[in-house]
């Protein structure tokens, strides 16, 4: 009974949902699906994707943002009525930030979906080719140079306007459950050409992440992993 969340054993699309459940102090079963079990589960999910959530053994529900909004109804302090638009605006901006980075990952995983290797002009850009490696590097460097400063500027401005330490003021909201894991990626050093110092040039963002991680519920989540 209760809420069951299923996702791969990575942060990915489910981390915002996990964080919201922890921040909302809502009990749930955090099922990490090993990739070897994915083929079997895929056909049972609404759109062939994870995460999925089930409530009281009900049918699987998909889409992380739908889950996030549902959690907001269970824990209204994460999306207070008088802040509703601000919180949603901030979530939309985090989604834009995530979308801006997506080609940097997609180019390595599925270059053909970005048009590489399927047309004569890009025929050299196929998996494991030196040309593709160059393109991956160039895309990621361009992101760090152009997109990261732009979005960090937007997020710092929001924190400043709300008087922080969070995106919408003194208390964390659903929007912070989205931004914190999106930013953390730039401090972990696990993606080629994205050094773990990538956020060092944005001290306001580092302070923001520290404030988020200092929340007792986030600390409890971290401890639950060990
Ligand atoms: N919009 C969806 C995206 C879900 C999604 O892209 N899931 C990916 C992993 S991040 C997936 O299940 N990939 C495996 C597959 O498609 O077979 C959400 O936010 O929940």
Image (cartoon, rainbow, N blue to C red):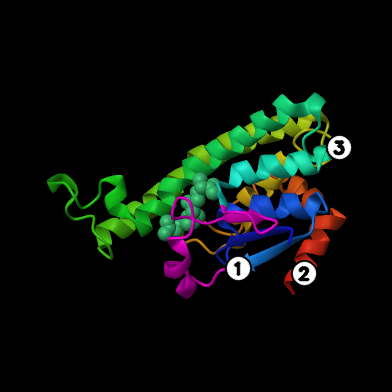
Instruction: Describe residue 65's horizontal placement relative to residue 218 as left or right.
Output: left
- Residue 225, compared with residue 16, is above or below; it is below
Q: Give the range drawn in magenta.
A: 33-60
Tell me which numbered mark, 2 or 3, is placed earlier along the sequence. 3
Rendered residue at 67%/51% (across/down)? 17
Instruction: Describe residue 31's horizontal placement relative to residue 112 as left or right.
Output: right
Tell me which numbered mark, 2 or 1, is placed earlier along the sequence. 1
* Distance between the alpha carbons at the discs numbered 2 and 3: 25 Å
Q: Mark 2 points at which residue?
A: 224
Tell me which numbered mark, 1 or 3, is placed earlier along the sequence. 1
Q: Mark 1 points at which residue?
A: 32
In the rendered image, residue 45 lying in the magenta stretch gets the answer yes
Rendered residue at 66%/59% (across/down)? 57
Q: Nearer the viewer, residue 86 or 26?
A: 26
Task: Tell me the tag on residue 204.
Answer: none
Q: Which of 90 and 46 is in front in this view?
A: 46
Image x and y of residue 59, in percent:
58, 54
Instruction: Describe residue 217's horizontal placement relative to residue 60 as left or right.
Output: right
In the rendered image, residue 218 lying in the magenta stretch gets the answer no
* Distance between the alpha carbons at the discs numbered 1 and 3: 32 Å
Image x and y of residue 82, in percent:
81, 24
């Amino acid at each position: 009974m209760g809420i069951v969340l299923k996702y791969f054993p990575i942060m990915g699309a489910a981390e915002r949902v996990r964080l919201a459940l922890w921040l909302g102090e809502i009990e749930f079963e955090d099922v990490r699906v090993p990739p070897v079990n994915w083929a079997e589960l895929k056909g049972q999910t609404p759109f062939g994707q994870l995460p999925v959530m089930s409530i009281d053994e009900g049918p699987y529900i998909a889409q992380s943002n739908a889950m996030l909004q549902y959690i907001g109804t269970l824990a209204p302090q994460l999306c207070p009525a008088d802040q509703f638009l601000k919180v949603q605006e901030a979530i939309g901006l985090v989604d834009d930030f995530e979308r801006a980075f997506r080609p940097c990952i997609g180019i390595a995983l599925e270059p053909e979906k970005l048009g590489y290797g399927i047309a004569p002009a890009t025929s050299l850009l196929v998996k494991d080719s030196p040309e593709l490696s160059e393109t991956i590097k160039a895309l990621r460097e361009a992101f760090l140079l152009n997109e990261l400063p732009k979005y960090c500027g937007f997020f710092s401005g929001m924190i400043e306007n709300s008087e922080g330490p969070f995106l919408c003021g003194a208390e964390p909201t659903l929007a912070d459950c989205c931004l914190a894991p999106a930013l953390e990626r730039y401090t972990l050093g696990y993606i080629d050409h994205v050094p773990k110092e990538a956020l060092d040039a944005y001290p306001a963002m580092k302070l923001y992440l520290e404030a988020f991680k200092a929340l007792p519920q986030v600390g409890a989540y971290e401890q639950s992993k060990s």
